[in-house]
Image: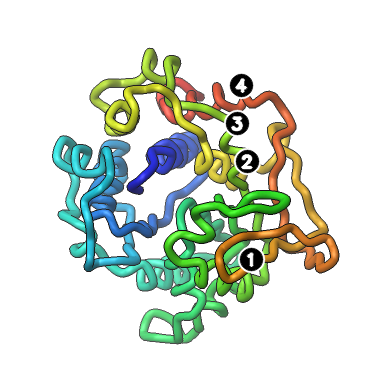
Amino acid sequence: MDSDVDDVGALAMLHAYERQGKANILGIIVTSDDLYSAACTDAINTYFNRKDIPIGVSQKDSLKSFSKYTEKIASEFPHQLSSNAAAETSTSVYRRILAGQPDHSVVIITLGHLTSLSNLLASPADKISSLTGEELVARKVKSWSCMGGRFPSGKEANFYRPDPASTVACLKAWKLPVTFAGWEVGEQIVTGGKFFKANSDPLSPVSRAYELYNQFKGRASWDQVAVMEAIEGAEPNFSIIKNGTCIVSPDGSNTWSEKTGNYFHSYLKIKSSPRAISQRIDQLMLNHLYK
């Protein structure tokens, strides 16, 4: 929740799905060093009447103010968290939420770099749970939807910036189904443009974020694709490529290998019209339009 605005659109979509009864937002992990990223997230949740959602952060110090929208959203809309420093750590939020859920019920969606997920997987048993992070994930999680990588090969920011070692560690430790929404998919699906502007509520933090980011010129929907797949599944908008493994190098670049298929990894390709997917995502981001 900082350098790009698709994070805002993805969170708005999750709230739309929750209102439709298709999702239950258990918690939000903010993996950012922007000073106002957690407060901005809290403001969006508060707008959608979910100020109770736990928010954990991966970084509490060495914070910078660099986002085009987070400080403005935090100053213009009601919220409780003052900054990342006031939030709970990502690992404790992850562990507490997972410990309280039924076995094999949780879907994790990652839309940024993987430091927080790596920290969870590496976490030891504690007073929250007698299970390690890997054991908690194995028992409580159903699947993982990851916006990251380029397929069949390439280099993408969530995998290499700023912590490629976490990406390598996550994929090494992960033993459950994971679907990657690669850069090349979301790049083709533009949302937050003229249609969104014409139908949005100017008093919404979602609308305000897109205005602040680029004056509703539209933006690629990398994060929204991962959310859509996590809640709705791939069909009919996407096809799933299976029977291979995403191999990540130390520099964060990745390659899809069919020689080492583990049957847990898969990645998305667009199956229907990018325009049709864009319209659907815009409607979900608008929240009140889509039933």
Closer to the observer: label 2 or label 4?
Answer: 2
Q: Which residue is mark 1?
A: 248
Nearest the camera: 159 or 22? Answer: 159
Amino acid type shown at disc 2? Glu
Residue at x 46%, y 73% (from the top left corner) = 120
Q: Residues within 10 Å of mark 2 (few under 14, many from 20)?
A: many
Badge 2 vs badge 3, beta-carbon distance below 8 Å: yes
Residue flagged by tag 3: what amino acid is it? Gln
Q: Position of residue 190 (x, y in %)?
A: 52, 27
Q: Is residue 239 left or right of residue 120?
A: right
Task: Tell me which numbered mark, 2 or 1, is placed earlier along the sequence.
Answer: 2
Label whose residue precedes the other's in the sequence (2 or 4): 2
Q: Which residue was labeled with disc 4?
A: 275
Q: Amino acid at mark 1?
A: Val
Q: Residue at 26% of width from left, 21% of height from top? A: 202
Residue 147: horizontal and vertical position, in percent? 55, 50
Q: CA distance from mark 2 to mark 3?
A: 7 Å
What is the distance, in whole Å, between disc 4 and disc 1 at their CAs?
31 Å
Give the Cα separation between the discs numbered 3 and 4. Answer: 9 Å
Q: Quadrant of residue 71?
A: top left
Sequence-wise, the earlier of marks 3 and 4 is: 3
- Given contact means CB atoms under 8 Å apart, are the residues at marks 2 and 1 in contact? no
Q: Nearer the viewer, residue 158 or 9?
A: 158
Measured in 3D between alpha carbons, the distance from the residue under mark 3 to the one under mark 1, in whole angstroms, is 24 Å
Q: Which residue is labeled 3 in the image?
A: 188
Question: SS for tag 3?
Answer: loop
Secondary structure beneath label 2: helix
The location of residue 73, given as percent across then percent down, is 22, 38
> Residue at label 2?
184
